[in-house]
């Protein structure tokens, strides 16, 4: 093995010189390359070993003493330093046994050693290339232990590289903000909701806070001057109860937009709530039960997109073929309120697709009339039954005086803090602004959190998210 490596040593050394970019710097490699067992971080590692030493640059003359200014003469070499290096084949551990040249002053006898700044930092034993390789692995979803194993280093060094590579709280210089912002919350550690905001166009993270309470959000954004905050044009968010008032206080000129995905999701959840209630009335052998439970996706489609011509055999409905539209009719005929809710959801989705905010305003006004009539009926019922009419709980009243699930969602839309957000979501001028970017970031955060087996400190997790997203 030693003879074979000696034959290939010239090629290997030249290759390493090119990789390390030290051909014309102050490192001189020997022709010997060995494969030997090295004791490293408490383990015996079979690795490839190169031998090198530092020399003066070709352009430099004899070094000058930094203390007295006199010339210096060569004074031997230091003991070899095991420099961990990452070669092109990262799975094979590679080390450079580096000896640093020493020089002594002719006058004051002060000594100094010649550093290899292109290969390794001063007082370090891991090469800059290995450090960059660890940084590239930190942008993936590997755990810290797996990164240390691939880079043949310790977990503490990987954590040290992560901490020194980025300061999460100096990410922004607080002198600019993007024109379009997304805000949301995500759970990172300890089941606590963390506030996160990003650029709605580029998808880069602006900041992540350990908590989503109003005080923390206000303190974070108040670090940006008022003139900077006034440049923000749009802020996209879900219908969190506290976000709209906080954003209006901080960004006076920004238009607040409700995310359309969350609006549709709220309506579909209301429809599913009623659908589940209806199919529980039937036996499991009934066709109504099977249609409502197993073919729920048909109720989530646009009615115009359903196939009304081609008969199809359905797996759970026996040998009788049905079209998609026929299945829809079977389900909606089970309950009149379910049909009303389905029609309301279709109207809202149609207005959202056409960006017809006037139609949505009309629907909310019609809901206001229904709500007023319902309140009158509830008061009459309370007076007749000797009940106090101070309750606003939907389940407190009999079934015929309860709001259907979609009207209950409309009450959220009609809330004073949410009304303009919902209407802006139906305007065509804001059609390009959604929470898509921040939802993608949240997905990355969840994958990183699960694959990395969690993090004890929020700051370290925040650093990894920034390296993953903003790099």
Image (tube, rainbow, N blue to C red):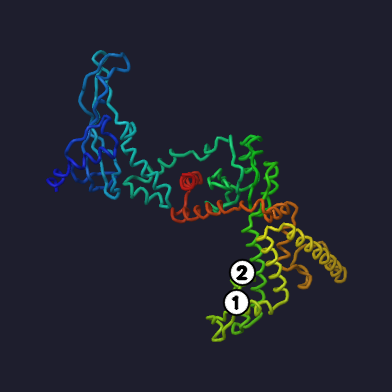
Q: Around disc 1, counting alpha carbons within 10 Å, would you say few (fewer than 14), some (14 to 19), or many (20 or more)?
A: many
Q: Which mark is residue 324?
A: 1
- The residue at which mark 2 appears reads as 301
Q: Nearer the viewer, residue 288 or 195?
A: 288
Q: Nearer the viewer, residue 373 or 180?
A: 180
Residue drawn at x 69%, y 79% as measured from the top left: 333
Report which quarter residue 97 is drawn in.
Answer: top left
Q: Is residue 342 left or right of residue 365?
A: left
Q: Are marks 1 and 2 in contact (CB under 8 Å)?
A: yes
Q: Which mark is residue 382?
A: none
336 versus 405 height, above or below: below
First in sequence: mark 1 vs mark 2 = 2
Residue drawn at x 65%, y 35% as measured from the top left: 227
Report which quarter residue 272 is drawn in.
Answer: bottom right
- Secondary structure at badge 2 equals loop
Q: Around disc 2, counting alpha carbons within 10 Å, would you say few (fewer than 14), some (14 to 19), or many (20 or more)?
A: few
Q: Position of residue 232 (x, y in %)?
A: 64, 42
Q: Is residue 376 left or right of residue 174?
A: right
Q: CA distance from mark 1 to mark 2?
A: 10 Å
Q: Is residue 83 left or right of residue 138?
A: left
Q: Position of residue 150 (x, y in %)?
A: 33, 49
Q: Is residue 363 left or right of residue 59?
A: right
Q: Nearer the viewer, residue 7 or 214?
A: 7
- Secondary structure at badge 1 equals helix
Q: Position of residue 286 (x, y in %)?
A: 61, 84
């Amino acid at each position: 093995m030693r003879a074979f490596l000696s034959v290939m040593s010239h090629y290997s050394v030249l290759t390493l010189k090119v990789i390390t970019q030290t051909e014309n710097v102050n490192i001189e490699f020997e022709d010997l390359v060995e494969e030997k067992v090295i004791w490293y971080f408490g383990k015996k590692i079979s690795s490839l070993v190169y031998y090198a030493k530092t020399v003066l640059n070709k352009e430099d003359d004899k070094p000058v003493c930094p203390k007295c200014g006199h010339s210096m003469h060569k004074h031997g070499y230091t003991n070899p330093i095991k420099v961990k290096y990452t070669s092109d084949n990262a799975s094979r551990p590679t080390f450079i046994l580096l000896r640093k040249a020493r020089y002594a002053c002719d006058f004051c006898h002060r000594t100094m050693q010649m550093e290899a700044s292109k290969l390794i930092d001063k007082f370090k034993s891991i090469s800059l290339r290995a450090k960059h390789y660890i940084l590239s692995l930190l942008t993936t979803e590997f755990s810290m232990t797996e990164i240390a194993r691939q880079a043949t280093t310790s977990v503490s060094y990987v954590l040290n590289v992560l901490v020194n590579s980025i300061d999460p709280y100096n990410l922004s210089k607080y002198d600019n903000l993007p024109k379009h912002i997304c805000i949301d919350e995500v759970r990172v550690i300890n089941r606590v909701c963390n506030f996160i905001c990003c650029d709605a166009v580029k998808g880069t993270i602006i900041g992540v806070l350990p908590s989503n309470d109003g005080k923390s959000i206000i303190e974070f954004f108040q670090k940006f001057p008022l003139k900077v905050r006034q440049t923000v044009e749009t802020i996209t968010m879900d219908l969190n109860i506290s976000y709209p008032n906080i954003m209006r206080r901080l960004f006076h000129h920004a238009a607040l937009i409700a995310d359309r995905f969350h609006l549709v999701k709220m309506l579909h959840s209301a429809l599913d709530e009623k659908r589940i209630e209806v199919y529980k009335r039937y036996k499991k052998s009934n066709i109504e039960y099977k249609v409502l439970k197993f073919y729920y996706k048909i109720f989530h489609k646009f009615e115009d997109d359903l196939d009304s011509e081609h008969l199809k055999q359905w797996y759970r409905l026996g040998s009788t073929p049905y079209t998609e539209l026929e299945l829809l009719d079977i389900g909606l005929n089970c309950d009149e309120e379910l049909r009303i809710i389905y029609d309301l959801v279709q109207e809202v989705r149609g207005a959202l697709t056409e960006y017809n905010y006037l139609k949505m305003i009309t629907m909310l006004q019609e809901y206001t009339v229904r709500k007023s009539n319902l309140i009158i009926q509830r008061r009459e019922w309370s007076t007749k039954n000797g009940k106090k009419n101070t309750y606003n709980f939907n389940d407190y009243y009999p079934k015929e005086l309860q709001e259907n699930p979609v009207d209950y969602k409309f009450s959220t839309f009609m809330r004073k803090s949410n009304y303009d957000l919902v209407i802006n979501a139906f305007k065509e001028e804001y059609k390009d602004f959604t929470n898509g970017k921040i939802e993608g970031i949240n997905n990355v955060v969840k994958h990183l959190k699960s694959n990395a087996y969690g993090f004890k400190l929020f700051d370290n997790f925040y650093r990894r998210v920034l390296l993953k997203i903003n790099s």
